[in-house]
Amino acid sequence: MMPNPDAPTWSLHPSGDRLLAIVCTHADPKVANGWCQALARAFADHLPAGVDGIVPAMISVTLHYQPERVLAAMPRDRRGGKSPYATSPYAISPYAILAEQVTALIAAFDLDRSAVGRDITIPVCYGGEYGPDLEELAEACGLTPQEVIALHTAAPVDVLAVGFAPGHPYIGYFDARLSLGRRSSPRPEVPAGTVAVANRQSVIYPTRLPGGWNLIGRTPLIMFDPYRAEPSLVVAGDRIRFVAIDRSQFEALASQQEGRP
């Protein structure tokens, strides 16, 4: 296999006694994110012994593992050996065992960054009570509110990560004209379904949460429901297309949702 000149540098880090974080270093954060999504998919297909969770983030992938299961899968004659990842001079640790396996797997993987998740449409009612910061953001960016909406709905965008709260997606990257940062004073409570932007990214608040992003609209869809088979409506690697709707459409779609948080 020929080396990929665009490939990033990977580094491994322990986190507590049952997490291994793989951090991607690349000049372009969007490229780094693509590699992390591909790596997470590859690990899902080749799960090392003892690993029971894979969490892709912006520029990292974290593996949750059970130390006793990692150690039990290791041949007994290796358990007292040495490893470049050993944290003790006396015996090889579950982390060191897993780190060796992960390093070998990353070297062997033929990562396909072109593979993406699902295409999902998110209807949004922009402005007014649903998007109280739309006009202020537009003015700060030298745009009209309609131009902000046009940029936000122009093309599909990637779900870069899901975090901060269950079902809370980070989506990007948008046009450079939407580079305005977060608000100086966060709100103590933002309604569920609110769509907000900052730093060329967008988030959707899945429940009532505090937040400092610029609120531009709201979706009637339920982003997170623990009683669904798939609790989170979107996951990292999905592609989102935002579609503008009016208030009557919002209310009609909202009435179809059951158990809205």
Image (cartoon, rainbow, N blue to C red):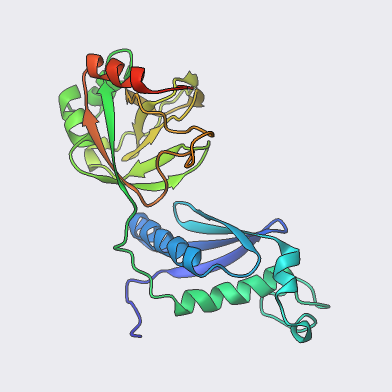
Q: Is residue 136 in view?
A: no
In this rendering, is residue 78 above or below 190?
below
In this rendering, is residue 46 above or below 84?
above
Residue 110: % across, % down: 38, 75
Residue 233: % across, % down: 41, 38
Q: Give the side of residue 92 with respect to residue 98, left or right.
A: right
Q: Is residue 21 in view?
A: yes
Q: Which residue sits furthest right?
A: 90
Res 139 → quadrant: top left
Q: Residue at x 68, y 73 (%)?
A: 96
186 or 206, which is in the foreground?
Answer: 206
Res 114 → quadrant: bottom left
Q: Give the side of residue 43 with respect to residue 94, left or right.
A: left
Q: Residue at x 47, y 22 (%)?
A: 259
Q: Residue at x 47, y 52 (%)?
A: 57
Q: Residue at x 51, y 76 (%)?
A: 105
Q: How many marks?
A: 0
Q: Give the side of residue 66 with respect to residue 238, left or right.
A: right
Q: Quadrant of the N terminus?
A: bottom left
Residue 108: % across, % down: 46, 79
Residue 170: % across, % down: 40, 41
Res 195 → quadrant: top left
